[in-house]
Image (cartoon, rainbow, N blue to C red):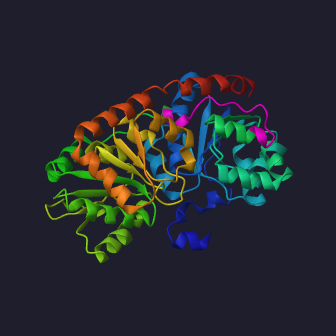
């Protein structure tokens, strides 16, 4: 943990929270505890939090996350009165300290949080736990299947599991949780990402109608693939602008230096410098501005899919009508990707550089095709809006029982 603090991976002023120490008092009344590992999980929980506050205003809500970035996002986006704390590390002492202080009446875990001490302590204290938007990739399924009774014991800590897809539901059922349901993916319930109007107009003016595309939520290695694609496209589409939003914004300065070492003219968002006609790559190392970049780029490549990282969420870009491209690694969103491909909203490519460049260039040179894909993406996202209603219906009984 000391090393993580030194690397900026932990908040030194709130490190006690990671060891289960609660400095702020527990609010009176019934307390719902919602836990999401990082930004994606915690953001997907925001519509659920809003609905809980609307339907049951008497309940108090505690949100825990495990990363500094997610804490920063929650500080801006959580409604007033909702408490955020860092989740305890999975040691018996830290977990016991957390439960001793907060005494949650109901826990809602988001996606794939299977920390043994945390789950087993909740079970020991008879805290009802429900896994919401449960996810289990094929790789994870194979790994947990090998663990035999160990994972089955962890699953027994949950009173209910709501899987985000039929495939995930089958995985949980095969591992012993037969009553698992599949109401849909909670990420569909997320509101459309916002963008600051002044920033939007300012950057749009700086772009000056240049042809451009976006790689968002990128992982190390994918940026160099993007630069190779940029070079191939720029031969045929002059004045091209490539925007890269790294998955972890703190990588921005290092990424910019890496790109400059590859002879690219780079502007770093965090430095506040304006785009110029000479800028080839805009590294958007800012937090909470994805809505801005989706509005400024009609063509978007999904990060985490060009390298074996499972892919990042395509729904936020789809809601804003982006024509989407992904690589071969989409294990985190198998059903969504397949459905979007079938709907004509997404183009999946192989991992070859040339294929990526061809796919991007085609959409830049055929704006009517990009518009058609964007409309299909928006329509697909809008068709899933009933997910939150189904999730809330399944939570009515456990909420009534606390």
Taking the spot 39% from the left edge, 49% from the top edge, the residue there is: 288
Residue 342 position (above or below residue 324) = above
* Image quarter in which the N terminus is found: bottom right
Q: In which quarter of the image is residue 368?
A: top left
Front one among 46 and 33: 46
Taking the spot 59% from the left edge, 46% from the top edge, the residue there is: 36
* Image quarter in which the C terminus is found: top right
Q: Please state if 158 lies on the left or on the right of 41 as rendered.
A: right
Instruction: Specify the segment rendered in magenta.
Output: 173-188
Answer whether residue 6 is magenta in the image.
Answer: no
Residue 28 position (above or below residue 15) = above
Residue 200 position (above or below residue 277) = above
Magenta span main SS: loop
Answer whether residue 175 is magenta in the image.
Answer: yes
Q: In which quarter of the image is residue 19?
A: bottom right
Q: Residue 314: horizontal and vertical position, in percent?
A: 45, 43
Q: Residue 200: horizontal and vertical position, in percent?
A: 23, 45
Which residue sits furthest bottom?
261
Taking the spot 32% from the left edge, 57% from the top edge, the residue there is: 357
Front one among 338 and 319: 338
Q: Residue 116: horizontal and vertical position, in percent?
A: 76, 54
Q: Please state if 16 lies on the left or on the right of 43 as rendered.
A: right
Which residue sits furthest right?
149
Q: Residue 328: horizontal and vertical position, in percent?
A: 49, 53
Q: Is residue 97 visible?
A: no
């Amino acid at each position: 943990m000391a090393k993580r603090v030194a690397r900026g991976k932990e908040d030194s002023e709130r490190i006690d929270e990671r060891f289960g120490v609660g400095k702020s008092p527990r609010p009176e009344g019934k307390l719902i505890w919602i836990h999401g590992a990082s930004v994606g999980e915690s953001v997907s929980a925001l519509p659920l939090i809003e609905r809980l506050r609307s339907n049951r205003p008497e309940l108090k809500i505690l949100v825990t996350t495990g990363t500094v970035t997610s804490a920063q996002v929650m500080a801006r986006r959580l409604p007033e009165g909702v408490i955020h704390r860092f989740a305890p590390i999975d040691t018996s002492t830290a977990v016991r300290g957390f439960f001793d202080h907060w005494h949650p009446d109901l826990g809602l875990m988001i996606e794939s949080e299977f920390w043994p001490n945390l789950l087993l302590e909740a079970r020991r204290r008879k805290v009802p736990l429900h896994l919401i938007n449960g996810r289990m990739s094929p790789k994870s399924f194979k790994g947990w299947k090998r663990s035999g009774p160990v994972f089955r014991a962890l699953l027994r800590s949950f009173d209910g599991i709501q899987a985000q897809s039929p495939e995930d539901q089958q995985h949980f059922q095969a591992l012993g949780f037969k009553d698992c349901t599949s109401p849909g993916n909670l990420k569909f319930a997320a509101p459309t990402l916002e963008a600051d109007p002044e920033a939007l107009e300012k950057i749009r003016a700086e772009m000056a109608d240049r042809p451009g595309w976006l790689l968002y939520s990128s992982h190390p290695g994918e940026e160099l693939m993007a630069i190779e694609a940029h070079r191939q496209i720029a031969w045929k589409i002059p004045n091209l602008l490539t925007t890269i939003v790294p998955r972890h914004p703190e990588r921005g300065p290092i990424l910019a230096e890496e790109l400059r070492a590859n002879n690219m003219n780079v502007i770093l968002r965090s430095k506040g410098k304006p785009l110029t006609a000479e800028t080839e790559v805009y590294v958007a190392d800012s937090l909470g501005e994805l809505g801005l970049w989706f509005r400024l780029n009609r063509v978007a490549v999904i990060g985490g899919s060009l390298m074996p990282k499972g892919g990042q969420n395509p729904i936020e870009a789809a809601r804003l009508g982006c024509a989407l491209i992904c690589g071969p690694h989409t294990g985190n969103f198998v059903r969504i990707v397949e459905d979007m491909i079938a709907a004509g909203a997404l183009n999946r490519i192989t991992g070859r550089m040339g294929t990526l460049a061809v796919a991007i260039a085609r959409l830049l040179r055929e704006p009517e095709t990009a518009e058609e894909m964007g409309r299909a993406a928006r329509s697909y996202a809008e068709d899933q809006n009933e997910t939150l209603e189904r999730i809330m219906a399944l939570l009515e009984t456990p909420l009534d029982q606390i």
